[in-house]
Image (spheres, helix red, strand yellow):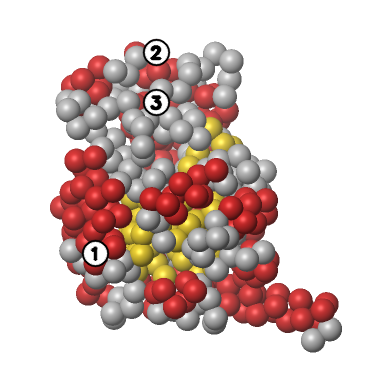
Amino acid sequence: MKSPVCDMFDIEFPLIAFTHCRDVVVEVSKAGGLGVLGAAGYNAENLEIELNWIDEHIDGKPYGVDLIAPTSMATTDDTTAEETLDMVPDEHRDFARGILAQHNIDTADVYQNQTGTPGGFLTPKRAGNIIDVAFSHPIKLIANALGVPPRYMLDMAKERGVVAAALIGAKEHAVKQVEAGVELLIAAGTEAGGHCGEVSTMVLVPEVIDAIKDYGTPVLAAGGIITGRQMAACMAMGAAGVWTGSVWLTTTEAETSPVIKEKYVAASSRQTVRSQARTGKYSRQLRSPWTDAWEGEDAPDPLAMPLQSLVSEPPLAKVTKLAEGGHEGARHLATSFVGQGVGLINSIQTTRQVVYEFMEDFIEANERLRKVIGE
């Protein structure tokens, strides 16, 4: 295909797959797209293990790494684990315990042995360690999911010939990113799973493309994209390809809990919610009694990142584990990040099947368009 993204990464099809599963990374890249490993949640040692495995199995195909180095957080490198835990009000933990108790879940051990270092969000020092590990491997892309990438990351990317990318949810951020040195923008609409803004993909993509038209920086469309025909529509608007996430959560290779996979397959596009209650910043996730409770009038206001994760992640981890064991209350509460495109996911397939269906659907969409314009 004639796309600048294909030229950037020497790939056949401009389908970029964000995933926390190394097997999905490998399968997408081998099938002609580009797999990107979400490094959130890994420390430097564990990321090294994951990337070594990818290097050994990907047969020299290109891949990337995505991390979360937000521009503002409630903690710093100097904040100790004990100080971080002390910053979390008892009110928030008590509220979370109350939700579980209402669904017959014992809460005595929910917050035992907390470390005060929630995975996923990187302070400058932690980000530097993760970035060093990433660049010690033959990655072709490195992306930051929240805000302008750290200067250290941008400089190393330029020095090593790695494409530096960033996700944005508003056109105002586009020029700032490009002027900082970002070479690939991902315009993520509000339909997206995980952290997202308020503007829909259909509106955001052309807004961003227009905002940076004088810079020549390629833009990937993201947010609710599950099919090749959606990909074709985004590329008709000027996108150079698509960045996808939710569609890989139900693949056979994905490490998503079987209980969550079942809920995804059964869900409609209206069964997601955008809330600050999971991480402290707005993110989209599957709606459940857990998310409903945090939207109630009696719920405490979400804490700043990363403190809210210290409230939400321990109980949700317990909920998922109990749900897998058949606990009915836990099954109702179970939730995880996913976009509105979940309504288009109707079965569990292999990763390669998903890639090939994207390709076929994309071709069919373009054939329909040619008929419309009379070619």
Type of the residue with mark 2: Glu
In-front residue for pair 98/59 = 59
Type of the residue with mark 1: Glu
Which is more N-terminal, label 3 or label 2?
2
Which of the two marks, 1 or 3, is nearer to us in this view? 1
Q: Position of residue 202 (x, y in %)?
A: 67, 54
Q: How many marks?
A: 3
Q: Position of residue 92 (x, y in %)?
A: 40, 18
Q: Which quadrant would the C terminus be assigned to in this image?
A: bottom right
Q: Residue shown at 29%/63% (left/top)?
A: 158
SS label for mark 2: helix
SS label for mark 3: loop
In-front residue for pair 324/112 = 112
Q: Is residue 81 above or below residue 237?
A: above
Q: Position of residue 251 (x, y in %)?
A: 47, 64
Q: Which residue is mark 1?
A: 159
The label shown at residue 362 is: none
SS label for mark 1: helix
Q: Residue shown at 18%/22% (left/top)?
A: 82
Q: Is residue 137 above or below residue 367?
A: above
Left or right of 45 on screen, residue 183: right
Which of the two marks, 2 or 3, is nearer to us in this view? 3
In-front residue for pair 202/330 = 202
Q: Which residue is mark 3?
A: 304
The label shown at residue 91 is: 2
- Furthest residue in direction bottom, as rendered: 375
- The reply to whether residue 157 is in sight is yes
Spatial CA span between label 1 and label 3:
34 Å
Type of the residue with mark 3: Ala
Which is more N-terminal, label 1 or label 2?
2
Spatial CA span between label 2 and label 3:
15 Å
Q: Position of residue 246 (x, y in %)?
A: 51, 55
